[in-house]
Image (cartoon, rainbow, N blue to C red):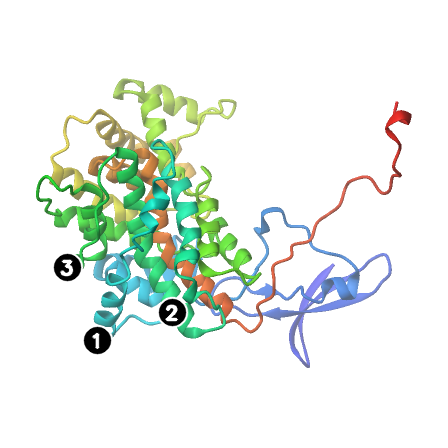
Amino acid sequence: MTATHSSANGPVFTLLDKESGHEFELPLMHASIGPDVIDMRRLYAETGCFTYDPGYTSTGSCQSRLTYIDGEAGILRHRGYPIEELAADSDFMDVCHLLLYGELPTAAEKQAFEDDITHHTMLHEQFYYFFRGFRRDSHPMAIMCAAVGALSAFYHDTTDIHSPEHRRIAAHRLIAKVPTIAAVAYKYSMGQPFVYPRNDLGYAANFLYMMYSNPCEDYVVNPVLARALDRILILHADHEQNASTSTVRLAGSSGANPYACIAAGIASLWGPAHGGANEAVLKMLGEIGNRDRIPEFLDRAKDKDDPFRLMGFGHRVYRNHDPRARILRESCHEVLEELGVKDEPLLDLAMELERIALEDDYFIDKKLFPNVDFYSGIIYRAMGIPVAMFTAMFALGRTAGWVAQWKEMIEDPAMKIGRPRQLYLGEVERHFVPLEERG
């Protein structure tokens, strides 16, 4: 039995132990928007019980001022700003500054911030020997996990997490260097020379330059593609306490250096249920094969007994439209038009699948609309980014959110080392039996 009421110390949530008749009062913490939270910190001391919440889907693990999501209403806001406005009117550097420091930068602040990020994009020259130790066919995410973690060996002058200046420099270095690491991982897999960053290019344009230029000819970055990539980075910048962000916070709660924490986030992002979703979209399109087979696979998706699922449709958090998908749909069609993509079978198949699904009563009723992974995968394919790089692209944008979440956690006086509890179901007690006596 439970009840919520006010006490002398503010609103409380009351638990009644029916067996003993004892009542336990737990403080109720109010959110500025969204669900309130029952403060469970005294629960074990007062009741002798823990809560049981696999996946922590009903547990607030921290206080945060960064990102708000309302999945039912299709709302995503960073520091109060709707994602639609940020994607339409700002750029990725604006959003990085917003997440890190709480406000959109003034013109002077933005110039200083961009200059600092730009001048941190290069890697230590010895770092390039590190990449050559990998096999040529290594997955880019394997290289990124190792390389980002290794940054602490090259930049150990900014690993004092208690120094505000060290935190600032480490945050800027990570945002600046992750694209360079990702581009180097791609070049290495292709057997091409590594390309150094250029200080005269913007963040997204610089990444495309490092990916696609070579010493044999000039490469001019297409502004439509740069803008589309910049928008993808904005849409992936942060997404509340998801698996990889929670991983970064949990690693950081032990006092680990920021480079190790972000490497842990990259490892979590690599999972196919998280950052690998847009890669799964392309694999699904390859399985469907051509337009004529779409009805067959739509029927399979509707069959509860068939394990097949349409990847890139619906979302665990957004029960209606994914607000990021609406924005990226526009960019997707802009990119396809700019590149004049007409004879690419998979992209043609994706557009037909989108059209049918948006008109099919089953998908409309179930609210299984194309999500951000569906469109980002198509854009990456059109840009010529290989499927193995898709999750690495996700990491480019999410690094901003990871470092902002890490910074917020370190600066929170209520921070404690993460220590989830368990419901133990194993043997109670057994005694050792010598090998010769075991039957």
Q: CA distance from mark 2 to mark 3?
A: 23 Å
Q: In front here: 363 or 290?
A: 290
Circle on res. 200: 3
Taking the spot 45% from the left edge, 37% from the top edge, the residue there is: 272
In this picture, is 181 found above or below 402? Answer: above
User: At which x and y percent is residue 363?
Assistant: 38, 34
Q: Could you tell me which residue is drawn at 71 percent across and 67 percent down?
A: 42
Q: Contact, CB < 8 Å: mark 2 with mark 1?
A: no
Sequence-first disc among 2 and 3 = 2
Q: Secondary structure at mark 1?
A: helix
Place of residue 417 in the rendered image (x, y in percent of width and height, measured from the top left): 61, 62
Q: Is residue 1 visible?
A: yes
Q: Residue 430 location, x and y as percent?
A: 87, 39
- The alpha-carbon separation of the residues under discs 2 and 1 comes to 18 Å
**Helix or strand or loop: what does disc 3 sit on?**
loop
Q: Nearer the viewer, residue 201 or 36?
A: 201
Residue, disc 2: 168
Decide which of tag 1 and tag 3 comes sooner along the chain.
Answer: 1
Observer-side mark, 2 or 1, equals 2
SS label for mark 2: helix
- Residue type pointed to by label 1: Ala
- Residue at 40% of width from left, 73% of height from top? 165
Residue 284 in which image quadrant: top left
- Residue 108 badge: 1
Residue 370 in sight here: no
Figure check: 251 above or below 350: below
